Amino acid sequence: MDSHFWTALAASGISAVVTSLGILTIRKFTEWGQKNTAYFACFAAGVLISASFLHVIPKALGMNPQGPMWLLVGFLGLHLSDVFLTAFVCQRDVEKEDCALGIVPALGIGFHSFLDGFIYSITFTVSVFTGSLATIGMILHEFPEGIITYLMLIRGGFSQRKATLLAFLTAALTTPLGMLVSYPLLSSLDQKRLGSLLALSAGALIYVGATHLLPRAMQERKKFSLLALGGGVCVAVLVVSTHH
């Protein structure tokens, strides 16, 4: 393996560590985290929705003219997953809506984190400098991503141990996994296919932010919810500007 491979692997590993730190931090202060879930949800919604509209969607459309179709597939696909999980997967002793609230966002974030691994592979193949810029941008949202994944699973009725394990598997481990899967395939992965994956990811992220995180957070009517949402938007703008 060349030096670019090891650099990309190290960067994706750092990303997983930062996400794991978010998970472990919020587990230690779970009661505080549950009281402030609305703020984390608003912040995460601001990041996910804004980053999708400002960066992921334009990038996907530039790479694949059929991007809007894949965007719709990503959005509706996650909705159908939501319906399936609510109807058939969630346990009877857990409120079904809350169960789906935990699992579906975790799946969406996991898919996004897996594609983050693709980004590390691609950008470090271009140059170490480009990869480093991408790393700085993406790591900015890894810590709160770990927090919100864990909290959504807790709200879904999972125990602390199961929520920690699932959050680690979906939000943290998927990034280096995506990097390891994608790096050998770069030579055969054309621009249109990558554009399709990015559009799918954008559809999934918008669904998670707009239909799960934001509505539930707004229901709690916390005093500084809008401020938290604005903070998430600002972070997304910073991430996008860093990528450029």
Image (cartoon, rainbow, N blue to C red):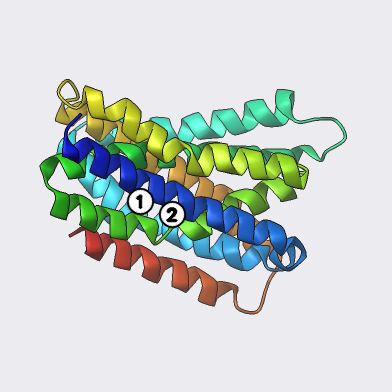
Q: Is residue 223 above or below residue 33?
A: below
> On the picture, is 154 further left or further right than 22?
right
Dot 2 crowding, Cα within 10 Å, few <14, some 14–19, many 20+ = many
Q: Quadrant of residue 27?
A: bottom right
Task: Return the residue nearer the eye: 180 or 2.
Answer: 2
Q: Amino acid at mark 2?
A: Leu
Residue furthest left in the image:
126
The alpha-carbon separation of the residues under discs 2 and 1 comes to 6 Å
Name above or below for residue 87 compared with residue 20. Answer: above
Q: Position of residue 207 (x, y in %)?
A: 49, 44
Q: Which residue is mark 1?
A: 52
Q: Which residue shows up at 23% across the image and 36% down it?
A: 5
Question: Quick one: label 1, few (<14), some, or many (20+) residues within 10 Å?
Answer: many
Q: Quadrant of the C terminus?
A: bottom left
Is residue 24 shown left or right of residue 197?
A: right
SS for callout 1: helix
Q: Is residue 54 left or right of residue 155?
A: left
Asked if residue 162 is positioned above or below residue 150 in the image, the reply reads above
Q: Residue at x 75, y 47 (%)?
A: 160
Residue 120: image location, x then y, percent: 27, 43
| Relative to 117, residue 134 above or below | below
Q: Name the amino acid type tagged 1.
A: Ser
Residue visible at 58% across and 64% down in the picture:
40
The residue that mark 2 highlights is 48
Instruction: Look at the image and tell me whether residue 101 can be seen.
Output: no
| Mark 2 in CB contact with mark 1 (< 8 angstroms) | yes
Q: Is residue 143 visible?
A: yes
Q: Position of residue 213 (x, y in %)?
A: 58, 54
Report the front residue among 110 and 72. Answer: 110
The answer to which image quadrant residue 34 occupies is bottom right
